[in-house]
Image (cartoon, grey):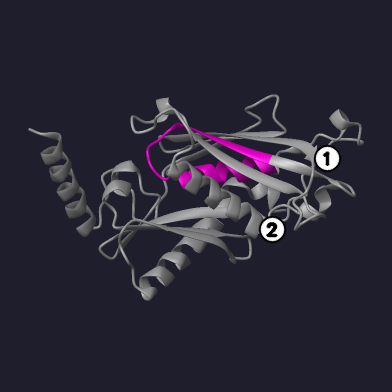
Amino acid sequence: MSSEIIAEIKKDYMYNLIKKGERVDGRAFNDYRKIVIETGTIRKAEGSARVWLGDTQVQVGVKMQPGEPYPDTPDTGVIITSVELVPMASPSFEPGPPREDSIEIARVVDRGVRESGAIDLEKLLIAEDKVWMLFIDIHVLDHDGNLVDAASLGAIAALLTAKVPNKRYELGEDAALPIRDIPIAVTAADFEGQILLDPELDEERIASTRLTVISGKDGSIAGMQKSGIGTPTQEKIEEMVDIAIKKAKEIRETHFAEFLK
C-alpha cells in the first residue's frame, strides 16, 4: 500500500474522530499535551530553558552583550531572535540557510516579546551610544507539532531567569532583566469548525487553518499569526482568540506562578 493511500486513510480516521469529539491521543479539544520547563540548562548563557510540549522539544539560550542601538530607537535595548531547525529533530529539516518556517517562528516569538513589552528595553541603556543587545537563540531538538508555542514558552522562561552580565563588562553587579510581562502563545487549529488547541504534528498537517494568539497578563493581544489555506469566519476567529487568551492565563498561572507575585 502506497504512503499516499496510508496518509489518506489516516487523515480520514482523524477527521472521523474529531467529528465525534475525540482526538487520536485522547485529549479534549482544549487540552494541551504535558508541558515541562527546565531553566538554567546552558551554563554559559545569561538565561536558558528547555521545554517539552508532549514530544516536541526546544532549547533556548539568551546571550547579552553591549552594542549600538538602532537609529530609530537610540535609547532602548535591542532584541534579536533566531530559530534553528536541527536536522535530527525531523526528517523534513535539512542543513543550510534559515528556512521560511524557521524565520516565521522567530518573528512570532520576537513579536510576542517585543509587542507585549515583556522587557523594559529603556532600562537596557548603558551609555549615550551603547545599549544591551539581547540574543534569543532557539534550537528545535524534536518536532512533533506546535513549535511556535514551545519556542515561545522557552523564550519567556529563559528571559525570566536571565541575568544582565554587568560584571563581565565592568558595569557593576549582575542583575535580573527588567521583566514587565509574561506573554504566552497559544495555537488553535480549525477542523471544519471544530477548534483544537496545541495540535500535534499529524493534526497540523490536516488542519485547514491554525491561529497563534500571543497575549499578556492582562489579556491584551501582543501578536497573532495565521497559517494554512483555510479562511475562518470573523466569528470563528473571535472564538479562537477568546479560547487562546483563557488558555494562556491557565498556562501562565500553572508554569510561571512564582513570577506573577
Q: Position of residue 163 (x, y in %)?
A: 77, 37
**Label 2, label 1: how far apart the Cα atoms are:** 19 Å
In this view, the residue in front, 153 or 126, is: 126
Is residue 238 part of the magenta span, yes or no? no
**Picture layout, residue 6 above or below residue 254:** above
**Residue under circle 1?**
175
Q: Who is closer to the viewer here, 250 or 100?
A: 100
- The amino acid beneath tag 1 is Ala
Q: Position of residue 204 (x, y in %)?
A: 33, 48
Q: Is residue 150 magenta?
A: yes
Q: Residue at x 63, y 52 (%)?
A: 113
Q: Residue at x 62, y 47 (%)?
A: 256
The reply, left or right, for residue 246 in relation to residue 80 is left
Select label 2 or label 1 by which is in front: 2
Where does label 2 land, which residue? 117
Q: Quadrant of the N terminus?
A: top left
Given the current orientation, which residue lies at the most extreme left position? 1
Mark 2 and mark 1 in contact? Answer it, CB < 8 Å.
no
Q: Which residues make up the magenta segment?
A: 135-159
Please state the horizontal and vertical placement of residue 99, each as a whole percent of the image.
44, 39
| Residue sitting farthest toward the bottom | 235
Identify the residue shown where x is 91% and y is 36%. 171
Give the total of numbered labels: 2
Q: Position of residue 194 (x, y in %)?
A: 29, 62
